[in-house]
Amino acid sequence: MASSGIILHLLVITMATQVASAFKYSDGCIVSVLSVNNNNIIAMYSRDFQASSEPVQGVHLSLDGNNQAMRVTWFNPHPFHSGPFHPQCMFGPSQHVLKHTSTGTAYTYRGGNFNQTLNSALLDLTQVGGGGVVSNTTVFYKCGDQNYGWSDVKQFTLLGRNAKKKEVADDTDTFCKPSLTGFFKDETPTVAAVADLSIDHGKHTIAALSNLAQAGKIQLLIHAGDITYADRYGGDSHNNSYVWVDYMNRMEPVVSRVPYMTAPGNHESEFHFAAYANWLNMPSTESYSNSTFWFSFDYMGVHFVSFSTEHEFMQNSTQFHWMESDLKAANRNRRAVPWVFVFGHRPLYCTSVICRERCKVEAPVFRSYLEDLLYEQKVDVYMSGHNHQYERSLPVYRQRAVQEDYKNPKAPVYIVNGGAGNPDFNDPTFEPRIPWRGSDEPTFDTGYLLFQPTSTQLRFQYMASRSNEVLDRFTITKSP
């Protein structure tokens, strides 16, 4: 790291030390004493949420895991006891030809005083593709209930499992301030990735992702935990289900257009993860998982593995055994799907000063559970959130950088990507002089990650949500 970077890190550490007497620890991070006073917490997180009278709300997509169907989930604002409900989706090859119908299910849950209705339907895309799903198939759809009303017509484009063969120029060292139409310099399909995203401080991230999705510039969104932060709201009554409704309504321009694939974080644990498990339908069964909290899928040449750091994942756990089996199978399929990308909420490598307990105490324990497995199975990237900041490692194993570049890496790259916009503020503090660290971003500003997979490259850009500036850029390459 350059000397100016070291000075900046030292200044941030000095500032944190000077105000430490006015701070306390919470969940492994230093937080203001105001935020650990229960009455002030209620005041801090009280706000007017946006309500909608639309009959269909919070429409969002998720992949089925077999690349033959798309699941649509949505919110009906009517109480569940007022049924019966007859949810359906109509879909087809154009907005004027919705000739296929999928009958959905209606259900509810009780956590957070939720008493309204969720609906879910699986669209069999082989019907649109004439008996076989074709990569880049665009599907138009609308969902609703004949007794309550319908959504407007929406669309998505299904991509294939396998990698794009085209190679693109490696402009890793070229920084720019791009326009909406040119975050990357070509039209290679792009994945967006976030963690720790709430309504208030995440508004710039949500707006940026909405613009990208509506312009067709991203094809998938993954979210590594801490979704809505509903557990911060509702006071002693914990009446906070409205937070999920508002969040999904705000995210609808993104996640009704591209699949939204998630992992649970610590802020989803309230009510035994009831809201997470009911709002977000992931392809667990299709990936031979016995839990809704971990799953995998192949998309755009990447084998994605979503796992839960909020459930047991030590070596003798059910989740660990599932992940081990899944990663071995993915390795056997590298010719078709060359990349393996694991995401979960809590980091295995991090250097935050404010969240030093997470990095000095928790992360070594998590590495003792998983690092050998990720290394042995040649995982390319592990992405997490939890810390509200962005940093990336060099290829690293057992706290030692195995190389100084990203060409044919011999160990995983670890990315902390938790700066999308939590209800508090982002963390600009990093320990200086970390040999295995590749880059960090000491800022309070929110951001999100983009990456483009091809058969031989993973090209990353970390974006500032408000300005759309490229704050960090790197490329992982592997020989054909």
Image (tube, rainbow, N blue to C red):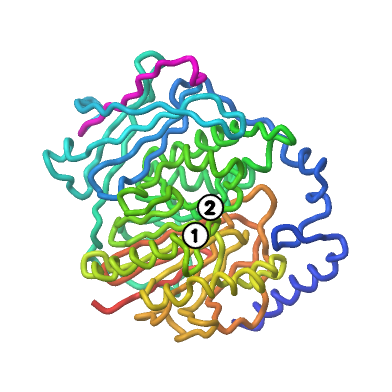
* Rendered position, 106 above or below 63: above
Q: Residue furthest right?
A: 21
- In the figure, residue 10 lies in which quadrant? bottom right
Q: Please say whether residue 401 is visible from this viewpoint.
A: yes
Q: How crowded is mark 1: few (under 14 residues within 10 Å), some or many (20 or more)?
A: many
Q: Nearer the viewer, residue 259 or 84?
A: 84
Please tell me which of labels 1 and 2 falls first in the chain.
2
Q: Residue furthest front?
A: 316
- Could you tell me if the residues under marks 1 and 2 are in contact, i.e. CB atoms within 8 Å? yes
Helix, strand or loop at label 1? It is loop
Labelled disc at residue 424: none
Q: Which of 73 and 187 is in front in this view?
A: 73
Q: Residues within 10 Å of mark 2 (few under 14, many from 20)?
A: many
Helix, strand or loop at label 2? It is loop
* Rendered position, 153 above or below 38: above
Q: Position of residue 260 (x, y in %)?
A: 41, 46
Labelled disc at residue 225: 2
201 relative position to 192: left or right: right
In the rendered view of the protein, which quadrant contains the C terminus? bottom left
96 relative position to 181: left or right: left
Q: Please say whether residue 466 is visible from this viewpoint.
A: no
Q: Mark 2 is on which residue type? A: Gly
The magenta stretch is 78-93
* Rendered position, 78 above or below 284: above
Q: Position of residue 25 (x, y in %)?
A: 77, 61
Seen at 53% across and 75% down, the residue is 368
- In the figure, residue 140 lies in which quadrant? top left
234 is within the stretch colored magenta: no
Q: Mark 1 is on which residue type? A: Gly
- In the figure, residue 416 lies in which quadrant? bottom right
Labelled disc at residue 344: 1
